[in-house]
Amino acid sequence: MSLTGIGVILIGIAFLVLAIYLAWTLNNLAHVLRGIEKTVDHLPDQLDDIFRETGNLINQTNSTVSDVNEKLRAISPLFYIVGDVSEMSRKLTSPLSKFKMSARKRKESQ
């Protein structure tokens, strides 16, 4: 057998090894793509569930905000009353405080 024949046999073997490696790689890629296909097939059902739950959450949030607004409207007058009482007490104690300060100044100056 000549060197040319041996070279051709080695090239053939290398080509066979390369073909087997490419077939194995493509088979693994096909397996990954099948897994992706299964995931994509389940995606619309999952998205429907997510959108349904999101809609329920928005409805619950709207009802909670409405309830809070009603309760704030009901308690608002109480805050106004407390504000009025504090303003009135400030107005009543302000002259007393001024009188006390002036008495203290008079006492210190004597």
Image (spheres, rainbow, N blue to C red):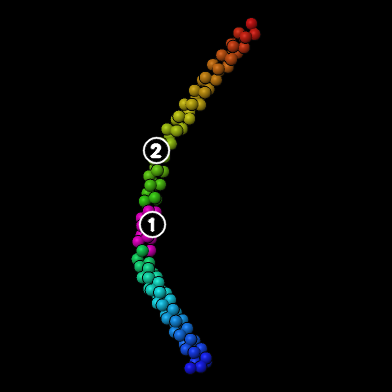
Q: Can you say whether 5 is above or below 65 in the image?
A: below
Query: Residue 74: which numbered mark, if any?
Result: 2
Callout 2: helix, strand or loop? helix
Determine the residue positioned at 45% across, 85% down: 13
Determine the residue positioned at 52% across, 19% down: 93
In the image: residue 104, left or right of residue 23: right
Determine the residue positioned at 52% across, 92% down: 4
Which SS does the magenta portion mostly show?
A: helix
Write the start and end of the magenta stretch as one range: 47-58
Q: Is-magenta flag for residue 36? A: no
Labels 2 & 1 near each other (Cβ < 8 A): no
- Image coords of residue 98 (percent x, y): 58, 17
Cα separation between marks 2 and 1: 30 Å
Q: Quadrant of residue 31?
A: bottom left
Q: Can residue 91 be seen in this view?
A: yes
Query: Residue 54: which numbered mark, if any?
Result: 1
Mark 1, Cα crowd under 10 Å, few <14 / some 14-19 / many 20+, is: few
Between residue 40 and residue 91, name the one nearer to us. Answer: 40
Q: Can you say whether 78 is above or below 27 in the image?
A: above
Determine the residue positioned at 59% across, 15% down: 101
Amino acid carrying mark 1 in the image: Thr
Q: Can residue 41 be seen in this view?
A: no
Q: Can you say whether 108 is above or below 93 in the image?
A: above
Between residue 29 and residue 76, name the one nearer to us. Answer: 29
Quadrant holding the C terminus: top right
Callout 1: helix, strand or loop? helix
- Image coords of residue 60 (percent x, y): 36, 51
